[in-house]
Amino acid sequence: MVTNGQDFGMVASRMSEDDYRIKGGDRGFVHKGGMVPEMEAVVFGMKVGEMAGPFQAAGTWLLVKMEEKRPGRQISFEETRDKLKKELEVKLRKQLMDAWIAGLRSSAKIEIYAKENNKESQ
């Protein structure tokens, strides 16, 4: 537990076992639906400056500090256009690659020749 005025980020850097330790445990801003339900139940009930935990969510022990809250808002299409475009490109690329590989597999002729070790023929 972070106590006696210890810096949360320093403790997270040393003690955490996930990739967020590199950023001092900072996950940035999160939105509802972006975390496992057990974690959301704790996080969205916290006040700024408050710490919660340790508690278990998705088989992991967590300690959370609420640094800042922002009111929910609808993101405009302009704000999300580039991210959406990249996601769609990745999805299409995967679909095309899967179709191409399936076509190669369906038209491939594969024969396996195994050398038999038969003592009777020696």
Image (cartoon, rainbow, N blue to C red):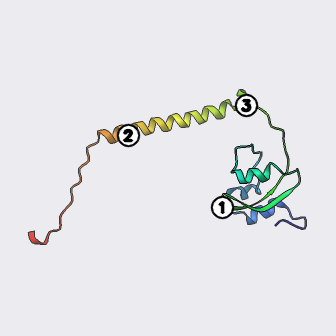
Task: Give the structural element (helix, strand or loop) at label 2.
Answer: helix
The answer to whether marks 3 and 2 mark residues whose Cβ atoms lie closer than 8 Å is no
Instruction: Say whether residue 104 is left or right of residue 48.
Output: left
Q: Residues within 10 Å of mark 2 (few under 14, many from 20)?
A: few
Mark found first going from the N terminus, 1 or 2: 1
Q: Residues within 10 Å of mark 1 (few under 14, many from 20)?
A: few
Q: Is residue 122 visible?
A: no
Q: Residue at x 84, y 65 (%)?
A: 2
- Three-letter residue code for mark 3: Glu
- Three-letter residue code for mark 2: Ala
Task: Give the structural element (helix, strand or loop) at label 1.
Answer: loop
* Front position among marks 1 and 2: 1
| Vertical relation: 47 (above or below) 87 | below
Q: Residues within 10 Å of mark 3 (few under 14, many from 20)?
A: few
- According to the picture, the residue beneath numbered tag 1 turns out to be 59
Q: Is residue 59 visible?
A: yes
- Three-letter residue code for mark 1: Gly
* The disc label shown at residue 102, or none: 2
Mark found first going from the N terminus, 3 or 1: 1
Q: Quadrant of residue 77?
A: top right
* Front position among marks 3 and 1: 1
Q: Residue at x 70, y 49 (%)?
A: 35
* Front position among marks 3 and 2: 2
Instruction: Say whether residue 13 is left or right of residue 112.
Output: right
- According to the picture, the residue beneath numbered tag 3 turns out to be 79
| Vertical relation: 77 (above or below) 93 | above
Q: Position of residue 8 (x, y in %)?
A: 83, 60
Viewport quadrant of the N terminus: bottom right
Q: Residue at x 70, y 43 (%)?
A: 33
Task: Give the structural element (helix, strand or loop) at label 3.
Answer: helix
Viewport quadrant of the C terminus: bottom left
